[in-house]
Image (tube, rainbow, N blue to C red):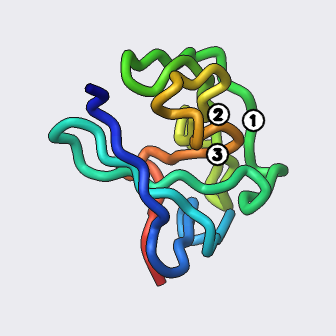
């Protein structure tokens, strides 16, 4: 049995980098994994591509798969490794392909 659950996130979600809106979506997904806080995944097309800069930091998760991190440009400078994307999701996480999640300790993700 997988320890990851994926649901449509209710309402409109926004992500801000140092106060600047870099994306918003009515199509976001809520991911619950084990006993961790939920994470919101945004469709990649709902995020301003110009603010994303590839990082060398890899991502690996037994439940979700492999991926990459991105630095995020903000009005106050670059926020290192603030976003990530699954490039090779597990079968349980296949819905997350072409979605981005953000480190809530580095940017603001909230329902509006």
Q: Which residue is mark 1?
A: 53
Relative to 30, does residue 63 appear above or below in the rendering? above
Q: Residue 111 occupies which quadrant of the picture?
A: bottom left
Q: Residue at the far left: name it.
A: 35
- The label shown at residue 99 is 3
Identified at 69% across, 49% down, the residue is 73
Q: Which residue is mark 2?
A: 70
- The label shown at residue 10 is none
Between the residue at mark 2 and the residue at mark 1, the CA separation in whole angstroms equals 5 Å
Q: Are marks 2 and 3 in contact (CB under 8 Å)?
A: no
Between the residue at mark 2 and the residue at mark 3, the CA separation in whole angstroms equals 13 Å
Q: Are marks 3 and 1 in contact (CB under 8 Å)?
A: no
Relative to 109, does residue 78 appear above or below in the rendering? above
**Which numbered disc flags the more N-terminal residue, 3 or 1?**
1
Identified at 60% across, 56% down, the residue is 42
Q: Position of residue 4 (x, y in %)?
A: 33, 37
């Amino acid at each position: 049995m997988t320890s990851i659950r994926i649901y449509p996130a209710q309402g409109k979600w926004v992500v801000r980098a140092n106060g600047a809106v870099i994306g918003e979506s009515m199509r976001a997904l809520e991911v619950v994994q084990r006993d961790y806080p939920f994470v919101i995944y945004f469709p990649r097309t709902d995020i301003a591509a110009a603010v994303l800069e590839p990082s060398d930091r890899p991502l690996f998760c037994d439940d979700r798969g492999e991926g990459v991190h991105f630095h995020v440009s903000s009005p106050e400078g670059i926020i290192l490794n603030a976003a990530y994307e699954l490039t090779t999701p597990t079968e349980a996480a296949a819905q997350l392909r072409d979605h981005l999640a953000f480190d809530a300790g580095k940017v603001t993700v909230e329902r509006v």
